[in-house]
Image (spheres, rainbow, N blue to C red):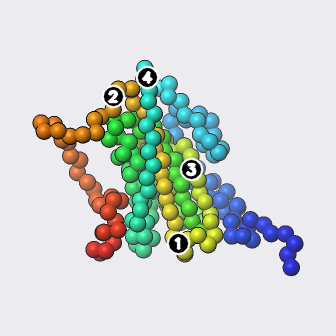
Amino acid sequence: MKSKISYKDSGVNINEGNKFVKKIQPYVKKTLTSQVIGNTTSFAALFSLKKERMKDPILVACTDGVGTKIEVGIKTNKIRGLGTDLVAMSINDLICTSAKPLFFLDYLATSKLKVDYHAEIIKGIVDGCLESDCSLIGGETAEMPGMYDGKDFDLAGFAVGAMERGCALPGNVAGGDVLLGLASDGVHSNGYSLVRKLV
């Protein structure tokens, strides 16, 4: 009988986690601006608002996920776009207030980390951050044995932006207002429980 048990024995592979961080670092670095202070591989990230040149900056924060679209991504083996959608879900909520996106953090949870497979998600997150002009300054990758089946995983994203105090867009629409619509490039992530039933 073993007298000692390790993290690896319990199903958590720290070496794989370290390989994952090393693999994704070059992608993450593409998103970093001069406002990011220090090392993004530490447990907390620092970000300067000085460049924003706001007199009275207000931070705006939101969080979201991609919901059951994950199942579609796993079944079709197209998971990179899930990372992009993750960023879009939060950034879209953020810009509805008139806030300028500043930075993003992600959370990826899985039973068994697969470096190359899960790095595709991070590449998608980087794509979304570059498109949104925000820095990916941190995240958490949780390897949780027994919590998810097979290739299953979950994602959450957290976006922070800033705006000048008093510049928030109103939350209501009234007669005579001008509405601007932006063309969608797809179904995005809302309503996928229904989409999955239809396809």
In the foreground, 125 or 194 = 194
The amino acid type, in three-letter code, at marker 4 is Asp
* Disc 3/disc 1 C-alpha distance (Å): 20 Å
Q: Which residue is mark 3?
A: 139
Residue 49, disc: none
Q: Nearer the viewer, mark 4 or mark 3?
A: 4
In the foreground, 68 or 13 = 68
User: Can I make out residue 114 in this image?
Assistant: no
Residue sitting at the far bottom: 1
**Label 2 environment density (alpha carbons within 10 Å; few <14, some 14–19, many ≥20):** few
- In terms of sequence position, does the residue under pointer 4 or pointer 1 come before the other? 4
Residue sitting at the far top: 55
Residue 56, disc: 4
- In terms of sequence position, does the residue under pointer 3 or pointer 2 come before the other? 3
Question: Residue, x 52% and y 47% (percent of image)?
Answer: 105
- In terms of sequence position, does the residue under pointer 2 or pointer 4 come before the other? 4
The amino acid type, in three-letter code, at marker 2 is Cys
Name the quadrant containing residue 95: top left
In the image, 33: left or right of 81?
right
Residue 167, disc: 2
Helix, strand, or loop for circle 2? loop
* Disc 3/disc 2 C-alpha distance (Å): 29 Å
